């Protein structure tokens, strides 16, 4: 399936004979492969007599031969899948078999997850869905602000591809012009007081232009700068992520705190923070040295942290 998709990914027409010769199969077998692509990857392929086959829209497929050698320079082994239930779930499974750090990357997720149990919509071949497994030792203090640091790296990558208005929303979302473009989900296993492993899950809307089932305002990179090469974006993200993680490991979150605050899109705005049992309304002052949100509430400053908190902007 993947080889045929690579032949079609340019969005141009290719004859059945041309495709059959490239794949070493008959033209009737090409049609069967096309039917499988449409069923398994939910990719629309047009079939026009006399012209051949083409995708409804061009794709930028992930290329292991391009990615693996460059990621290995960071010391990251690559596990690339056409389809997986969840890159975070697969990374957790691989912890029993592989040495860290390693990266799990997929063309699509069948059960992608976001924060607070939300489903992460993951159409085939359009976005980036990846999880980086790392080892952290030295106690819980080494984890402080880690999800914010990952968001900062994603934002830096978006700036690099020509979207300077990309900004951050506490605790770990990336926005463009008021709409979400990326999210982060961190999962821990082991002893956070001593040695643990952290799975850093990242989802970025790259070339997606339409999707069903997303329950919030969203956007994609393509909407702002046109279609881009997902392999190059993945490498840019990896470079930014490695740099931010190294700074965090060496100096802690305080070394990145000011940069994070300067890119927080709701800095100084009136917001409501929900803990699930109670709402707090106040003005966003920034974040503390642990990555917790600082709010001015009725003249008093308070800090909040925790994975189940939800922040919304007051109208």
Image (cartoon, rainbow, N blue to C red):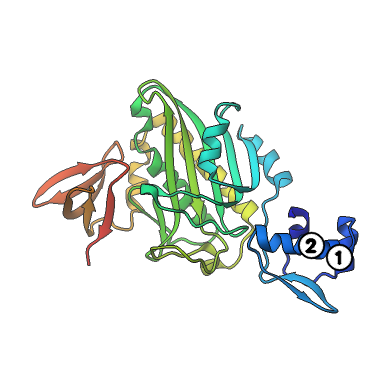
**Residue beneath the point at 66% across and 70% down:** 57
Q: Quadrant of the C terminus?
A: bottom left
Q: Position of residue 113 (x, y in %)?
A: 46, 48
Q: Quadrant of the N terminus?
A: bottom right
Specify few, some or many for label 2: CA neighbours under 10 Å numbering under 14, 14-19, or 20 or more.
few
Q: Position of residue 257 (x, y in %)?
A: 33, 42
Tag 1 secondary structure: helix
Displayed quadrant of residue 74: top right
Mark 2 lies on residue? 32
Q: Nearer the viewer, residue 185 or 43?
A: 43
Cα distance in 3D space between marks 1 and 2:
7 Å
Q: Position of residue 123 (x, y in %)?
A: 57, 59
Q: Which mark is residue 66?
A: none
Q: Nearer the viewer, residue 50 or 11?
A: 50
Q: Is residue 149 above or below residue 94?
A: below
**Residue beneath the point at 87% across and 58% down:** 22
Q: Which mark is residue 28?
A: 1
Total number of numbered discs in the rendering: 2
Specify few, some or many for label 1: CA neighbours under 10 Å numbering under 14, 14-19, or 20 or more.
few
Q: Is residue 168 above or below residue 253?
A: below
Looking at the image, residue 38 sits to the left or right of residue 282; the answer is right
Q: Nearer the viewer, residue 284 or 304?
A: 304
Q: Is residue 50 above or below residue 240?
A: below
Looking at the image, residue 55 sits to the left or right of residue 213; the answer is right
Looking at the image, do the residues carrying marks 1 and 2 touch, with CB atoms under 8 Å apart?
A: yes
Tag 2 secondary structure: helix
Q: Is residue 251 above or below residue 159?
A: above
Displayed quadrant of residue 23: bottom right
Looking at the image, residue 152 sits to the left or right of residue 46; the answer is left
Q: Position of residue 159 (x, y in %)?
A: 49, 56
């Amino acid at each position: 399936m993947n080889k045929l998709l690579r032949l079609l990914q340019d969005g141009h027409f290719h004859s059945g004979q041309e495709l059959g010769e490239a794949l070493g199969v008959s033209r009737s077998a090409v049609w069967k492969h096309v039917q499988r692509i449409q069923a398994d990857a939910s990719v629309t392929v047009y079939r026009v007599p006399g012209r051949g086959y083409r995708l409804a829209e061009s794709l930028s497929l992930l290329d292991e031969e391009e990615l693996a050698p460059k990621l290995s320079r960071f010391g990251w082994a690559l596990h690339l899948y056409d389809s997986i239930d969840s890159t975070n779930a697969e990374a957790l499974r691989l912890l029993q078999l592989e040495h860290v750090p390693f990266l799990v990357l997929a063309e699509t997720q069948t059960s992608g997850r976001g924060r607070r149990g939300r489903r992460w919509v993951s159409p085939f071949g359009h976005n980036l869905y990846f999880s980086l497994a790392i080892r952290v030792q030295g106690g819980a203090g080494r984890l402080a602000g880690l999800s914010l640091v990952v968001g900062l790296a994603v934002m830096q990558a978006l700036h690099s591809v020509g979207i300077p208005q990309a900004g951050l929303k506490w605790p770990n979302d990336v926005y463009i012009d008021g709409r979400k473009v990326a999210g982060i989900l961190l999962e821990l296993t082991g002893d956070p007081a001593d040695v643990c492993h952290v799975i850093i899950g990242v989802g970025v809307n790259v070339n997606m232009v339409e999707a069903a089932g997303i329950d919030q305002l969203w956007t994609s990179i393509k909407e702002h700068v046109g279609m881009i090469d997902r392999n190059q974006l993945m490498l840019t993200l990896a470079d930014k992520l490695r740099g931010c993680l190294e700074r965090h490991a060496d100096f802690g979150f305080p070394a990145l705190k000011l940069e994070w605050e300067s890119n927080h899109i709701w800095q100084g705005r009136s917001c409501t923070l929900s803990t699930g049992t109670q709402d707090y309304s106040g003005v966003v002052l920034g974040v503390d040295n642990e990555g917790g949100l600082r709010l001015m509430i009725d003249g008093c400053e308070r800090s909040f942290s925790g994975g189940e908190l939800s922040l919304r902007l007051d109208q």
